[in-house]
Image: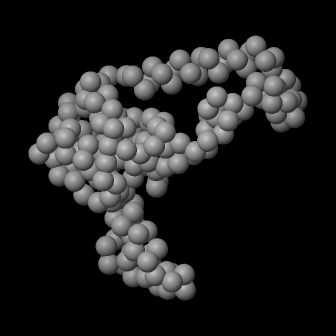
Amino acid sequence: MYVEGVSTRKVKEITEELCGTSFSKSLVSSLASSLGQELESWRNRRLEAKAYPYLFVDARYEKVRVDGRVVSQGVLVVSGRRDGGYREILAVEVANTESEATYQDLFRSLKRRGLSGVELVVSDDHEGLKAAVLRHFQGASWHRCQVHYARNLLGMVSYASRKELGADLRAFVGLHSGVCSVADE
């Protein structure tokens, strides 16, 4: 309910219906404030690994509440593989739009928090994202996400042909291994 931006009044009604007990609006507000502080602390935490050689960058669009209205906004997600092969979500940021400027800001923030050692960035084919990668991770390779590539290919054929082409693509490039983004997983 916190993530969806449900009002404190509705939270009270929902918990009453589901749990048989209600929470006061002030308790719900207090809990939401606490969650907001924890989220802000997580978003600004220092990245501790010595290096994150592999970055996976993606965006998805979600309906969010802004100034009392529900609008579509981009949720930028960056995950990294660090020492020992462990995957870590490094950033989740909401942006009005996907652009080179928003990715520049995101990468600057990650570098200030300690991101280093990037050797490969995997993402979709967004021009602004690719430009920001080139600017912030000189010497790193960029690779187009196979899942996004396959979706683009499937969108170019008739609906009737998609199932067969999808099966052929999975067999050919091993898409079943889930090599793309955190948003697809």
Q: Give the color scheme: rainbow, by chain, secondary structure or one colour.
A: one colour
Q: Position of residue 135 (x, y in %)?
A: 19, 41
**Left or right: where 105 falls relative to 185:** left
| Location of the N terminus (image quadrant) | top right
Residue drawn at point x = 24 percent, y = 57 percent: 143
Q: Decide if residue 175 is on the left or right side of residue 163.
A: left
Q: Quick one: 100 or 159, which is closer to the camera?
A: 100
- Asked which quadrant contains residue 92, the reply is top left
x and y percent of residue 169 in the render? 37, 77
- What residue is rendered at 46% in x and 37% in y? 95
Answer with the quarter of the image where residue 50 lies.
top left
- Tell me: residue 129, above or below residue 178: above
Q: Is residue 167 visible?
A: no
Q: Is residue 60 left or right of residue 48?
A: right
Does the rendering let one see residue 55? yes
The one nearer the camera, 162 or 31, is 162
Residue at image location 58% in from the left, 45% down from the top: 72
The vertical placement of 107 against 44, above or below, is below
